[in-house]
Amino acid sequence: MQTISGPRFAQLFLAQLFTALAVCLLAGCGKSEAPPTAPAAPGKVKTVGVAFETLQTEYWIAGFEAIKAELKKRDITMLEAVADSDASRQLQQVKNFITRGVDGIILVPKDAKTCIPMIRAANEAKIPIVLFNRPADKTDAQFTAVVADNPKLTQETVTYMIEQARKTGTKHKAMVVLGDLGDINAIGRRDGFEAAVKGNESFIEVVARVPSEWNQEKAQAGVANALQANPDISFIFTSSDFLLPSITSALKASGRYKKVGEPGHVILGGFDGDATAYQMLVDGYLDATGVQDVYFEAQASVQALVDRREGRPVAELYLDPGFVIHQGNLKEKAARMWGANIRK
């Protein structure tokens, strides 16, 4: 047996070592694929992008300001964008937030479908995203939604109105002013109305379902036509307080705008809790409205982002129960009604 030593041994040893390493690298050393990309590391939320579809109603303005106040309270910088009802523009705004490296996104989308690419973009960037007051359609994309419990709150509001109708001892012909049924919130409010009147047909007969598509002029024309066709309508629910001025104009034009307790009063209720509704409650013309708790929704939206970034579990859906405000509890509930506060 020949013994190899000295420089020649070292050369042979290194040659064998390099050969073994090359084989290992080519074969992947027993590993068939690279490890998955690690999720973004938890951390403190410093900057949040807030993208609203519109600021054309009091509710969206109140929601925007409530989020801004909540972020400021937590010393979080807010980047803001308004899409003016343009879904393509909003997608670019969300992508801009991502490019700027925000720690979270709060989104009010135009509708339940066009927001899905925005959610996917945030998912790919591993940035948590919360949908404020308007959820997405079913999707495997990951998001948290903070929304009003539209069916339940509407049902509670209309049930209160029906109780007032019962007290009169007469049957009432009713009108419901519907929202844009492409908006999941409007669908929920329609369903809540129908659930409330079901089983109460001996007191309430629905004779008019007026489409509005969230348009003031369309709502006013529809209400005026319904009142002309059914001049004895004495019960009206609107899917948004935003439409109350249109309803009021139509009632005034037909001589039907009376205070609660006055002969000929039309039992009137709404949904949202805006400044117009508050003033109509104070003045005695509105019976009730379902108030979305904008302060709850803003706090829950920001908290969801903070929890997600800090690695705590976050639900897919947080429901704002809201509350019904009416002539009997106005003083008690007004402080929590966002419309009462922005009127001050």
Image (cartoon, rainbow, N blue to C red):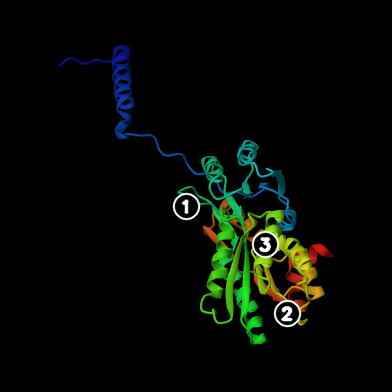
Marks 2 and 1 sit apart, C-alpha to C-alpha, by 38 Å
**Which numbered mark, 3 or 2, is in the foreground of this view?**
3
Quadrant of res 200: bottom right
Q: Nearer the viewer, residue 306 or 299?
A: 299
Q: Nearer the viewer, residue 154 or 72?
A: 154
Q: Which residue is mark 3?
A: 225
> In the picture provided, is 3 more to the left or to the right than 61?
left
Q: Amino acid at mark 3?
A: Asn
Q: Could you say where residue 288 lies in the image, as x and y percent from the top left?
A: 70, 74
Above-or-below relation of 308 to 202: above
Q: Which residue is mark 2?
A: 329
Mark 1 is surrounded, within 10 Å at the Cα level, by few (under 14), some (14 to 19) or many (20 or more) other residues, namely: few
- Give left or right: position of 327 versus 161: right
Residue 309 in the image, given as x and y percentages of width and height: 58, 51
Specify the quadrant that holds the C terminus. Answer: bottom right
- Which element is circle 2 on? loop
Q: Secondary structure at mark 3?
A: helix
